[in-house]
Image (tube, rainbow, N blue to C red):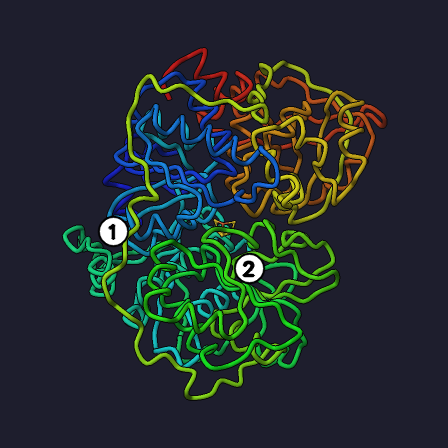
Amino acid sequence: MNLAYKILNAHLKKGELVPGTSICIGIDQTLTQDSTGTMAYLQLEAMNVGHVAVEKAVAYIDHNMLQTGFENMDDHEFIKSVARKHGITFSKPGNGVCHQLQLENFSHPGKTLIGSDSHTPTCGAMGMIAIGAGGLDVAVAMATGKYYVQCPSVLQVKLTGRKAPWVSAKDVILKILQELSVKGGVNKIVEYTGEGLSDLSLTDRATICNMGAELGATTSVFPTDENTLAYLKQQGREDEHVEMKADDDATYDETIEIDMSTLVPMVAQPHSPDNVVDVKELEGMKINQVVIGSCTNSSLPDMMRAAKILKGRKVAEDVSLVIAPGSSSILSMLAQNGALADMIHAGARILECGCGPCIGMGQAPLSKGVSLRTINRNFKGRSGTNDASVYLVSPEVAALSAVKGYLSQEFEDDMALEEVPDTPFVKNPNFFISEYIPDNEIYMGPNIKPVPRGDKLTDTVSGKVVLKVGDNISTDHIVPSDSKLLPFRSNVPHLAKFSFSKVDPEFYNRAVKNNGGFIVGGDNYGQGSSREHAALVPNYLKIKAIFAISFARIHRSNLINNGILPLVIDAKDYDFFNDQDDYELSDLLTAVEEGKDIVVTNKNTNETITAHLSLSAREKVMIQYGGLLNAIKELGGD
Ligand code: F3S
């Protein structure tokens, strides 16, 4: 058995490990961040449960940290009060980015984790199955200890060779993205094997697992070894080490091989993380801003390597360099070992430990500006500046380019960090609150509005196509995440006004005027972050179904959780749909119950096609009841 299936098998509650079928797995750990967490905890509250049913649940505050109004602080206070009531550990703002903190403090070989953030797979570096899911799925896992997911196939990435100097883990995953594309990992677990593993530290592996999310993968996983043990030792948790590895005769559904000795520094160009070329091709490109940080590249070794390049040098006059260490522990250590001073002396702006610029919370680039970032995504507008160009690179290339003022790989020998420090981590327990107060009063500020609920399925559903879009529509397109909107993640009616605003500013008015209707998309609809709001908002606007050639995994689940039909159409039928025409879905009750294709009629032309809907038994119930919350309320259980 491969490692991925070993861990899944040890947690299997229902179903069989057959790719494409629905399985239920036991969940050991959950995590939420504030941006998706507010809604997840409103949903948890609606389920009326006591102490969480998982070994460890953590509520992080890392996304919406600016307090330019009362909204964010209200949300943080709400999450803290729910955490106390249900025995969830609360990580205070300033403690760091959820994935870095989870890795440092709670990751554990062989365990399962789901998190309401698409980069939850970061902890796959620790030999765990760590999956990003919608907030409601995480709420249900907290209430029941279970998670339903489509059983993935397993893609083996065999690593050979050793990285050349100045080639980093970021270049390994950028190379894989270049080869496989943002759709290459859909419904797959990426399992890393091979003698090249020894050349990747645990935080290198975390970078690779983190950006496995950009492949669309369910998750990524590494075996454990002496590098895992070294990291656990640094965290004072060596007694938690467990050997996790595939059997010698393990089989995989697919295999690719990466010879790391052939890699060079790489860069992902706007506006997609798979738009990757060698740095050499763009060398000399003038830049305005450099951002080092995010859950992808904010570990201690990442920061130390950047600091070494900056030491004794000066950030170019026309460049703004901002650095956000991944956790308060990392910041403390940088302060103690002098690297922080090296960064500041060079002219870097130090941000508090959190997501910050990665989620467009401050540090929006210049208009038409060029920003080099160590983050994982460069979708248009995500930085907060719609016409900016964001390029994704390693921390080494980022720091060097900040000094040069242009994209560069002209490294000098004295820039190399001889040794990555393996001194024990400085722990900051005062940033965590772990209490269980069953009758704790829930704090509800005025920014917090109820969770939208869907309607029960009816036999016929009709409406207008209120929006037709193309391929690769991301959750950012559906619900933008700029800093002005982030404080309203607990206020769906307000967010709805901005839905698809960057694609079609009239969408909201049209959806309201027509009392909902249908949306038509192309390939890979709903890619990107796990943002549940990309389904909650359409639910609120009474969108009944989305037609698309294919759906991104988490978004498809979120739609079903919200009682919205994710209907798959053949590519040839994309032109059957016209913006503003009226359509009807008929015999839905039987089609859903019996898993038949659904007849779609264009009421203006009377032409018909069929759309496909393949639902597990549990998903059927959710669609029939108008969403998971309704189903749980009426039926109980999971
Ligand atoms: Fe935060 Fe960006 Fe990661 S928003 S969780 S740092 S992808």
Query: Residue, x 34% and y 52% (percent of image)?
Result: 124
Is residue 184 positioned above or below 632 on the image? below
Query: Residue, x 18% and y 50% (percent of image)?
Result: 240
Pick out the residue farthest to the top: 634
Q: Which mark is residue 1?
A: 1
* Total residue callouts: 2
Disc 1 residue type (three-letter): Met
Pick out the residue farthest to the right: 604
Residue nearer the viewer, 303 or 124: 303
Q: Is residue 223 left or right of residue 316?
A: left
* Location of residue 370 (image quadrant): bottom right
Q: Which mark is residue 181?
A: 2
Pick out the residue farthest to the left: 239
User: Which quarter shows the C terminus?
Assistant: top left
Say what secondary structure mark 2 lies in. Answer: loop
- Label 2 CA crowd tier, 10 Å (few <14, some 14–19, many 20+): some
Q: Position of residue 603 (x, y in %)?
A: 81, 23
Query: Residue, x 74% and y 63% (percent of image)?
Result: 368
- How far apart are the two marked residues, 1 and 2, measured between alpha carbons? 27 Å
Query: Residue, x 21% and y 54% (percent of image)?
Result: 244
Say what secondary structure mark 1 lies in. Answer: loop
Residue nearer the viewer, 280 or 285: 285
Disc 2 residue type (three-letter): Ser
Q: Position of residue 31 (x, y in %)?
A: 38, 39
Q: Position of residue 402 (x, y in %)?
A: 57, 74
Q: Is residue 257 visible?
A: no
Residue nearer the viewer, 432 or 42: 432
Q: Is residue 509 visible?
A: yes
- Label 1 CA crowd tier, 10 Å (few <14, some 14–19, many 20+): some
* Mark 2 Cβ and ligand 1 under 8 Å apart: no
Q: Position of residue 125 (x, y in %)?
A: 33, 56
Earlier residue among tags 1 and 2:
1
